[in-house]
């Protein structure tokens, strides 16, 4: 790397990074491109910009994976896909304060940047952007991006300022990194719909890539928030995936009536004493507007409190 940059070198990755043992990518490096052997980490917007500019000069494509850190296999699946489809990959690792409501878990949200560095290094990411909140938000910050309608139902009902915070930070990340492609999980299906809408409406020249939900062996969707669950709650949390799989099989077997599907799913969840339903709904996967009958791209989404932890899960079917 040129001396222009002041990245903290990720020393451990010198031994752990697969590039060093030649297994980093199956695609060819672009001729003349500097061979990347070390993953970098920075909290500085200008350093990210300088690095991406350098890559652009070399004609390289750039993928972005926005995350809030505490990375798991779900995040890794996004990074893997980004590594496979782009010459360089930036992972943002930032617990974005403006997407949390006042009584939500901003202060307790799990963080482990050392483990995140290891996962990103092993996955073949090139740069982690890990800013402090002060780097992202000036004290008099006052510009927000808000999608209407698509962000109002489902999670938007109990978290009215959430998607405004998500869109604002993702828009900022897009402007900082200027990626060709950005990767999001279907785990947060409404978020994916909201980001796609923002990108379309504001003519952002970025391809949004949706990636499937990664689950634990017993079906629970992987989530950084699963760490909040005690042993009993972890078992109870299986009602989400059980309900999701059941609802999905009903539609696959020909049921089209939304209430019939949702009632059956609610019944399964309500049978679990530690579970409290926030919502169980059928909506159009793109507009997030309610459906009375399953038709088109159908999203059935659930949000359930297990004890004090709010978990989400869903399925999407083309009907
Ligand atoms: P988060 O760190 O929770 O904000 O998530 C960052 C990205 O990872 C989002 O696009 C999520 O949808 C995605 N993600 C989180 N959990 C999973 C999962 N279990 N499977 C697939 N993608 C996931």
Image (tube, helix red, strand yellow):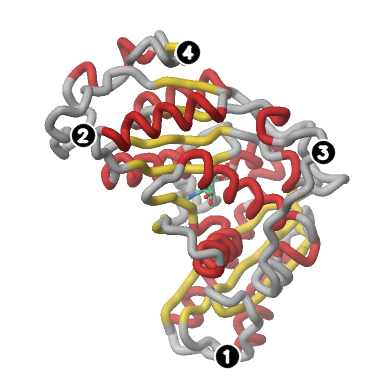
On the question of residue 209 being in view, the answer is no
Residue 232, quarter of picture: top right
Residue 167 coordinates in the image, percent (x, y): 63, 54
**Who comes first in sequence, dot 4 or dot 3?**
4
Relative vertical location of residue 253 with respect to residue 278 in this rendering, above or below: below
Marks 4 and 1, the one that precedes in the sequence: 4
Q: Looking at the rendered structure, which numbered label has been put on residue 25?
A: 2
- 68 and 49: which is toward the camera: 49
Whether label 1 touches label 2, CB < 8 Å: no
Left-right relation of 266 to 188 = right
- Up/down of 23 relative to 88, above or below: above
**Residue marked by disc 3:** 140
Distance between mark 1 and mark 2 Cα atoms: 44 Å
Query: How far is disc 3 from disc 1 in space, using C-alphas?
Result: 46 Å
* Residue linked to disc 4: 6
Query: What is the secondary structure assignment of the residue under circle 2?
Result: loop
Could you classify mark 4 by the number of other residues whose Cα lies within 10 Å: few (under 14), some (14-19), or many (20 or more)?
A: few
Counting residues from the N terminus, which is met first, the one under dot 2 or under dot 3? 2
Label 2: how many Cα within 10 Å (few below 14, some 14–19, many 20+)? some
SS at circle 1: loop
For label 3, the crowd category at 10 Å Cα-Cα, with few meaning under 14, some 14 to 19 and many 20 or more, is: few
Helix, strand or loop at mark 3 = loop
| Residue identified by numbered label 1 | 293
Cβ(mark 2) to ligand 1 < 8 Å? Answer: no
How crowded pointer 1 is (Cα within 10 Å; few <14, some 14-19, many 20+) is rated as some
Give me the residue at 72% from left, 71% from top.
153
- Disc sitting over residue 306 in the figure: none
The answer to whether the residues at label 3 and label 1 have Cβ atoms under 8 Å apart is no
Image position of 219 with respect to 266: above or below = above
Q: CA distance from mark 4 to mark 3?
A: 28 Å
- Residue 254 drawn above or below residue 240: below
């Amino acid at each position: 790397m040129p001396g222009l940059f002041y990245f903290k070198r990720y020393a451990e990755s010198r031994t752990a990074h697969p590039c060093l043992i030649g297994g980093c990518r199956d695609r060819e490096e672009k001729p003349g491109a500097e061979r990347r052997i070390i993953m970098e980490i920075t909290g500085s917007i200008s350093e990210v910009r300088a690095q991406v500019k350098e890559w652009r000069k070399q004609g390289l494509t750039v993928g972005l994976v926005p995350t809030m850190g505490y990375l798991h296999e779900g995040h890794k699946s996004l990074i893997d896909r980004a590594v496979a489809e782009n010459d360089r990959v930036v992972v943002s690792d930032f617990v974005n304060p403006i997407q949390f409501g006042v009584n939500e878990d901003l202060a307790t949200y799990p963080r482990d940047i050392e483990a995140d560095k290891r996962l990103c290094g092993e996955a073949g990411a090139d740069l982690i952007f890990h800013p402090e909140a002060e780097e992202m938000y000036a004290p008099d910050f006052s510009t927000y991006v808000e999608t209407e309608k698509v962000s109002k139902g489902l999670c938007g009902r109990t978290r009215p300022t959430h998607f405004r915070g998500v869109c604002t930070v993702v828009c900022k990340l897009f402007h900082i990194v200027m990626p060709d492609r950005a990767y999001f999980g279907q785990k947060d299906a409404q978020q994916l719909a909201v980001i796609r809408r923002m990108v379309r409406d504001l003519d952002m020249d970025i391809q949004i890539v949706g990636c499937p939900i990664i689950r634990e062996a017993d079906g629970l969707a992987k989530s950084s928030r699963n760490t909040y669950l005690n042993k009993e709650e972890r078992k109870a949390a299986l009602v989400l995936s059980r309900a999701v799989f059941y609802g999905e099989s009903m539609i696959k077997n020909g049921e089209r009536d939304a209430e019939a599907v949702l009632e059956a799913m609610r019944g399964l969840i309500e049978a679990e004493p530690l579970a409290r339903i926030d919502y169980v709904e059928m909506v159009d996967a793109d507009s997030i507007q309610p459906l009375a009958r399953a038709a088109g791209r159908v999203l059935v989404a659930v949000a359930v409190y297990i004890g004090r932890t709010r978990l989400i899960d869903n399925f999407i079917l083309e009907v």
